[in-house]
Image (spheres, rainbow, N blue to C red):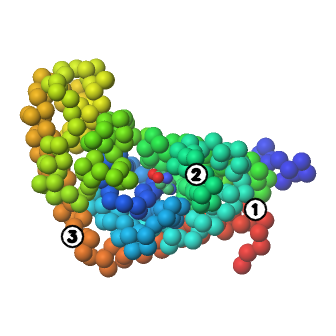
Amino acid sequence: MDASGTAPATAPKTVFKQKVFSGVQPTGNLHLGNYLGAVTKFVDLQDRYDCIYCVVDLHAITVWQDPPELTRAIREVTAAFLAAGIDPKKHIVFNQSQVAEHAELAWVFNCVARLGWMNRMTQFKEKTGKDRENASLGLYAYPSLMAADILVYRATHVPVGEDQKQHVELARDIAQKFNNDFGPQIASHGFGDAFFPLPEPLIQGPATRVMSLRDGSKKMSKSDPSDQSRIALTDDADAIAMKIRRAKTDPDPLPHEEKGLETRPEADNLVGIYAALSGKTRADVLKEFGGAQFSVFKPALADLLVAKLSPITAEMRRLKDDVSYIDSVLADGSARAQVIAAETMKSVKDIVGFVRR
Ligand code: TRP
């Protein structure tokens, strides 16, 4: 460290190990949108990266959660991770509140992030609307906690939906400012020219943005009052078939080309779901079903959904009754996560200048 307070130009470039982190909020019932948009991506990444998958219960309580319902939802998300094929032994599956370092690092980040940055967060503005005075302070600080989730493991890749991209970019800004503000200390403690990596969002393709079955312009959502708007991961075969039969469509047959879906959001959504579940492109699906009426396409889609989802929903139902197993997975994952997180916090304390044991 020199008197000007800048990092010595000699600090070696820090090399970060590639690591994936992502989180899912335990609120409401998991549905097809969560499954295709997030969970299947998490499963696919397991072969290429060390992965940490977190049930973000601290984020959930930024808006009111009924406590018994929160407990149920934490276990349900965990069951979905496991049922979909995430390996909790090779990777880490845990719930956020069991690793106190998330909240601890978030406090440091609250002192790094600028109000101007937080005020640009579109999700906060959308969620609070006109009633901002009544929003929790936690909801405002939400993106700073999310940055801590990722960076307490010094993760480099973050699979998220398009709607979370801005939050991952904020995490990059926080990491960058921390690295700059504490450059000399980072170098003198032997961490090279950067302590935190700048995490990158891994954005899922648009094919897996699943929309409401009642309105093709709205995302499938756990907060939609209509149960008909979504396929829950706990729905049985009859419920799935019924919801697809009743899904909103238009009177025309399916087009032969993708272009023909552009002004038909409901048709586009159903074709997109079929494509995602079968691992095909929309164009391939239209090669097969172009010219077909919905009376033909909908039963085919319902059959595919039942075939693909029923093994997972069956396993979820089985796991749901095995609370002690789920809780043991979370306890084991939390203990392993905490070892990494505690190591990061120790270094952060040294870098910031705290006195520690
Ligand atoms: N905000 C994310 C969502 O609502 C959930 C989340 C919390 C998250 N912490 C994270 C996602 C860290 C990725 C990385 O979907």
Disc 3 secondary structure class: helix
Give the image quarter of residue 122: top right
Check disc 1 and report the residue beneath it. 352
Q: Nearer the viewer, residue 36 or 90?
A: 36
Q: Dot 1, how many residues are within 10 Å of its Cα: few (below 14), some (14-19), or many (20+)?
A: some
Q: Amino acid at mark 3?
A: Arg
Q: Dot 3, how many residues are within 10 Å of its Cα: few (below 14), some (14-19), or many (20+)?
A: few
- Residue 330 point in image, percent of width and height: 40, 72
Image point (21%, 41%), residue name:
247
| Left or right relative to 282: residue 173 | right
Disc 1 secondary structure class: helix
Image point (48%, 48%), residue name:
158
Image point (77%, 69%), residue name:
354
Check disc 2 and report the residue beneath it. 131
Mark number for residue 318? 3
Instruction: Return the disc, 1 or 3, that comes first in the chain's sequence.
Output: 3
